[in-house]
Structure formats: C-alpha cells, structure tokens
Image: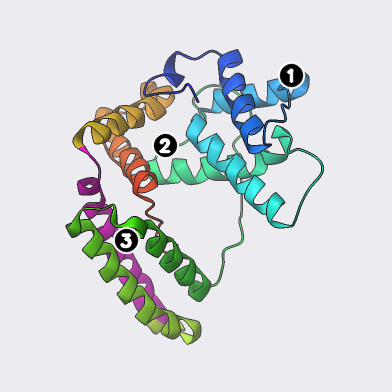
Amino acid sequence: MGVGPHAQLNMNAAEYCREIETYLCRKNEGHLIRVVGPVFERVCGWMQQGVPLKVAFRGIDRYCERYYGKGPRRRPVRVEFCEADILDEFDAWRRAVGVTGPAADGPEEHDSSPRRPSLSAHLERVIARLTASRAGGRWPRAFDDAVAGAVRELDALTATARQARGAARDEILQRLAVIDRRLADAAPAAVEPAALDALRREAEDELAPFAARMAPGERAKSAAAALERLVRERVGLPSVGYD
C-alpha cells in the first residue's frame, strides 16, 4: 500500500477507490476486481462518511477471513460483499475515538447490531491473541511481563465466567476493564519512538475529515483514542473489555 501518514487527507475519490481495489486484489491472491460504476459510487460514499482506509482494510479482512474459513472458494471476493463488515468496523472506530455523524453529507450512518460471542468464548479468544502477540520474544521486558500477567488473570477468570450471573458477572466485567486499561497504558512503551510519532500523525490524519466539527478538547481526546487503537494494532493487543 502506498498510504502513509496524512496521505488520505489529500486523497481524491479515485485514489481512495484505487487503494481499496489494490488491497482487495492482494486478498484475492492477485485477482483484480475493478471498482467501477455503482460500486465506485458506493466506495466514494465510504470516503464521504470519513471511513479511514485502515478501517476499511480491517473490514475486508473480516469478510475474507469468514469467507475463506468456510473452505476453498472459486470466486474472488467483490468489494461490495465487504460493505457490512467495513461499516461495522467504522462504527466501532467512531465509538472508540468519540466521533459522531459523517464527515460530510453523504449516505446515512450504518446501524449494526453484531452478535457477540459468549463471555467465556471472548476470554478464550483474547487469551489466544495475547499469547500470539508474545511469540518470538519481541517486546520489551516490562510490556511482555504485563501481557503475561494479564493472560494469567484472564485464564483464572475463564472458568468462572462460564457460570457467572448478576453481581458475579458484573465483577468480572469490571475486572476486564481494569486489565484492558493497564495493557493499553503499557503498550506505547513497546513501540519505538519514531514509530510512535508516525502513529500519532496517522491518528490525526484519520480524524482530519471530522476536525472542523470538533472542539479542540474533543479533538484532543479523540486523537488520543485513535492513537491508542493504532498502538493496539501495532502490538497485536486485543480489546480485553466485554461491552
């Protein structure tokens, strides 16, 4: 991908669609699906809403993972098939960074109601992802120790979570929020300073379409949340909380 920090801010609709097209081509193992005609207009609508390219890519990843997980497929994935996943990812991104409404007049907002896994299944997935993130011993000792400690805590909670109800379940959810915050606070230390600066600029770039509608304090808070999401992605840190 030729997209770096601040690139999307200066991108026109054709370039945005070309990035989507190129990414989907890679997911389709080189099979090119052109973004033209009504599909071009649909993808332009994502840009008008302010969907960051990385968020769109995550939506494509979600669809492709589910599609190919069912077994070999003869037909390549078309971009319109990924729309629901892309807009789900965009909804999650907006909630996390605190922006509301489209960046510009365009298609209506997407209202998604994704089905969640059970609490115990969520914990098992989080443990698996955290364990995978430690592979190769690539993290600084302090962050690696924080992740290892979180895995131990989550493992101890998993069995309890299967039967937890009422106050016991609420207590687990509160504990998950504490663990999630602790890991998020520790994660920036695992990123090289230059890379962290680049992610900070990228977070500002993602928010740029919404900036005119945001007060300075609101924008700073959203930029911090956007940076946290990018750092999480960089270090492979899943969301531990269960909302």
Q: Nearer the viewer, mark 2 or mark 1?
A: 1
Identify the residue under disc 3: 180
Indicate left or right for 108 with 2 as reference.
right
Q: Which residues are magenta?
A: 169-192
Rendered residue at 76%/51% (across/down):
72
- Residue 215: mark: none
46 falls in the magenta region: no
- Residue 36: mark: 1
x and y percentages locating residue 48 in the rendered image: 56, 23
Q: How far is disc 2 from disc 3 in space, using C-alphas?
A: 21 Å
- Residue 99: mark: 2
Q: Main secondary structure of the magenta part?
A: helix
181 falls in the magenta region: yes
x and y percentages locating residue 115 in the rendered image: 61, 61
Q: Is residue 5 above or below residue 191?
A: above
Q: How many marks?
A: 3
Q: Is residue 172 visible?
A: yes
In terms of sequence position, does the residue under pointer 1 or pointer 3 come before the other? 1
Q: Nearer the viewer, mark 2 or mark 3?
A: 3
Rendered residue at 42%/85% (across/down):
160
Q: Secondary structure at mark 3?
A: helix
